[in-house]
Image: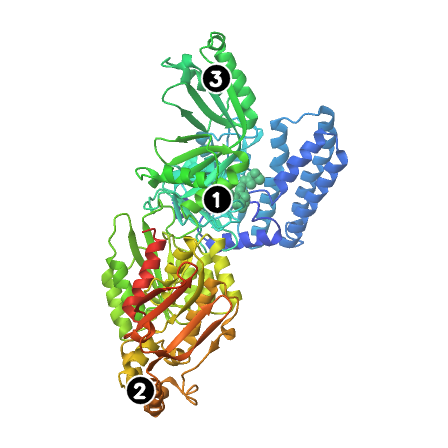
Amino acid sequence: MARVSRAPHIHKFGGASLADASGVRRAVKIVLAHRPAPQVVVVSAMGGVTDALLEAARRATRGETSQVRAAAETLRTQHAKAARALVSRGGRLDELLHHIDAAVDELKPLGGGLGLLRELTPRTVDYLVARGERLSALVFAAALEAAGCEVAYVDATDVIQTDDTFGNASPDLRRTERAARRVLQPLLARGAVPVVPGFLGATPDGQVATLGRGGSDLTATLLARVLGAREISLWKDVPGLLTADPRIVPDARVVPQVHVREAAELAYYGAKVLHPRALIPVLKRPVAIRIRPFADPSSLGTEISRRRTLEQYPVKALSAIPGQALLTVTGSGMLGVPGIAARTFAAVHHEEISVSLISQASSEHSICFSVPEESAKRARKSLEETFEREIARQEIDGVEVRTGLATLVVVGLGMAGTPGIAARVFSALAEAGINVIATAQGSSELNLSLVVEGRDAARAQRAVHAAFQLSKIGGGAVAQPERTDVVLLGFGQIGRALAPMIAKVKRKGLTLRIVGLIDRSGVVFDARGLSPRRLATLAAAKARRTPLAKAPGGRRTSAGDAVTFIARHALANPILVDLTAADTTETLKGALAAGMHVVLANKRPVAADRRVYDELLAAAHARGRRVLLEATVGAGLPIIDTYQKLVESGDRVLKIEGCPSGTLGYLFGEMGRGAPFSAALRGAIAKGYPEPDPRDDLSGMDVARKALILGRLLGFSGELGDIVVESLVPDGAERLPLDAFVGSLERFDAAWAKRVAAARARRGVLRYRAIVTRRRVRVGLVVVDASSPMASLNGTDNQFIFTTVRYKKNPLVITGPGAGPAVTAGGILNDVLKLAGA
Ligand code: ADP
Ligand code: ASP
Ligand code: MG
């Protein structure tokens, strides 16, 4: 007896899942895995069978007898092949093949009969298509039995009781409940697994009627309701209920849990994944329905239940119903006249046409509503009859019909009380150039419906899906235009100087947050933003050389994977700031492709091959993102900004000349004052001026990269290798390990002291200079006159001298500190603020 009281788990296998023998075998395995718990199995027709049967029926009415025969043979082969693969001879194979033959043979003479009548009633269609589900249930039951499970094929007409609306019958709950108790309970009590064809039921006078396309879902939920089941698994060819139809919105994402009212709304408004009325029987029952991926039975897919979760993400999913018509009743005589709306809908109801969207302007000049296109004519006729007198008296102008439309619905329980949803939907559609013809929002605010031209429907869904970032984790909230989310790639000295600066930015209408930190070891990420305290703790740990992967909340991963992981989340105006000195090109391309802006302090990606540079800019252009790189030249000095302002104001820059290395500037300044080379360089390292390997500065390569970046602004088409660079790395020191090199700097002191003295003898000082024009870029050591501006540079000062068409005789000079974490971070912050719209 214990078993009787245990509610069964209802499994429904969709047609796409049961396409062939291997699909049936996989489904059988799923059922076996749930044994010995009580289960009921509902099956759809094998993939494509319902469509094939409907097509055969249509052809029969056209008298195309041979095509009907051919279709019948195809069906026989499909089922017999599966049967032979699943059931061994000696077993029930012969019986099964006999059933298949009988069901298929019955089709052939129909060709003649329907051809004569040239008519296809919904009753006949139902009778014909019912064999799809029946055959697949027979095959399934035999396969399950062959696998050693006690089964019972139960015909749907013995359990599911309906009204007599052939083609779209409605279930009768009370009679179905009685039948289910009588037929199914004893089987379950015995430990057998009932296998029931979905989609079908019996009318009050015992004829077979179908529940409408996709009706097997409804069979499953009905059985769950009448048997008191707590669990329904709908096995489908998708990973779950998605944020949109994946055939229209390719980046649609699985929603882990939805409220049953949300799912019902989506189903009703066209989401093909569920029969429109499938959830009605279980709306108020404590049943967990799961849409589960047949391809991955271990995954839980989507839970549809009465839990309310994820409410901070008001928009859950969208769908659309194509083939809609909009009817509008207008007229000045409607103003304030009671009962017009009631009569309008009574007229439509009389024709049994279902209305999906209603909108009435408060001026009451018009009522407009949408109906399926094929019912539009009937609806119009009925309305014209109802309002015959008003039309004659010109109180009502008439009934306007507009066809070829689609209704787009945006669904989510959390939309109630969240301002800005409608505005975001409308602005997304406006940005995509899509006209909204009518709109309605239910008072429950569970659903926002919009009527658009049918041809715009797919684009409209993609635009709204993107606007709410539904493809992202945490998507579905109203976009926050005032927020900017920053990810730091590299958390060295500059990063640690930048983080508190970003945290301190306080401006009206602007929220800057750091959401992620990435280093060589891994990532720390929080979509809600890392608090200043957390950032400070992480910075302190990092300064003690603890890699991020080992910090609290850190995970080990490559930079590229970290960016991919972060990009899966719904972020606002995301910016990746590259603070490394590494070749990060691929990571940056990934970030741009995922819709992030990029701010660079790292010169390498933009001072690499021209092709790499172009690809980076193309990736940014393709997604409408920007790459800003002010901090790559002159740290925080406005060099690229000045160049751009000159160009924007109509000037032409002919030459940029300067000392763009704070490290070398500092070095020559110190040596000019008499310091030995070794002491000057160690001092620079202690202050954090040079690149991680100071030979990058001494070799002139760092200056050459900056010069190349400036050259590319001016139109220089060469590569780094085309630049003449004079290296200051002493002979033999190029290959030393970094520590050995830094440890033996004294060796070079005497030679440098000599060069400094020689320059002084000529009343000059040593400077490392770049000269950049469109044609040529040169980088090297020069002696400049002690009275020239360059000679006056102090500390880490950089200097840039712009010769332009306007500033020709007296060039434009920018001088200031050009190295060090604080000024560099300041330059980066400026770029970030630019992108944040500040
Ligand atoms: P079954 O095999 O159970 O009959 P259906 O074919 O009726 O399953 O439903 C699954 C199909 O629904 C998917 O293949 C997908 O193309 C479509 N679909 C439309 N909207 C959605 C959505 N929001 N989520 C998942 N699938 C959807
Ligand atoms: N076989 C039917 C259809 O294709 C019912 C179902 O699959 O649920 O619509
Ligand atoms: Mg279906």
Q: Amino acid at mark 1?
A: Arg
First of labels 3, 2 by sequence position: 3
Relative to 821, does residue 188 appear above or below in the rendering?
A: above
Residue 104 position within the rendered picture, expressed as x and y whole percent measured from the top left:
69, 39
- In the displayed image of the protein, which residue is found farthest to the front? 809
Q: Amino acid at mark 2?
A: Ser
Per the rendering, the mark at residue 678 is 2
Residue 647 position within the rendered picture, expressed as x and y whole percent measured from the top left:
43, 56
Label 3 and label 2: CA atoms lie apart by 96 Å
Per the rendering, the mark at residue 366 is none
Q: Nearer the viewer, mark 1 or mark 2?
A: 2
Q: Can residue 759 be seen by looking at this rendering?
A: yes
Q: Which residue is mark 3?
A: 347
> Which residue is found at the position 50% from the left and 48% from the top?
235
Would you say 41 lies left or right of 632 here? right
Please say if the residues under marks 3 and 2 sit with CB atoms less than 8 Å apart: no
Q: Which residue is mark 1?
A: 462
Q: Secondary structure at mark 1?
A: helix
Q: Colour scheme in the image?
A: rainbow
Relative to 644, does residue 662 appear above or below in the rendering?
A: below
**Which class describes the residues within 10 Å of circle 1: few (<14), some (14-19), or many (20+)?**
many
Relative to 337, does residue 569 appear above or below in the rendering?
A: below
Would you say 512 lies left or right of 95 here? left
Task: In this rendered view, identify the residue nearer to me: 832 or 573.
Answer: 832
Q: How many marks?
A: 3
Q: Nearer the viewer, mark 3 or mark 2?
A: 2
Please say if the residues under marks 1 and 2 sit with CB atoms less than 8 Å apart: no
Q: Amino acid at mark 3?
A: Ala
Q: Quadrant of residue 414?
A: top left
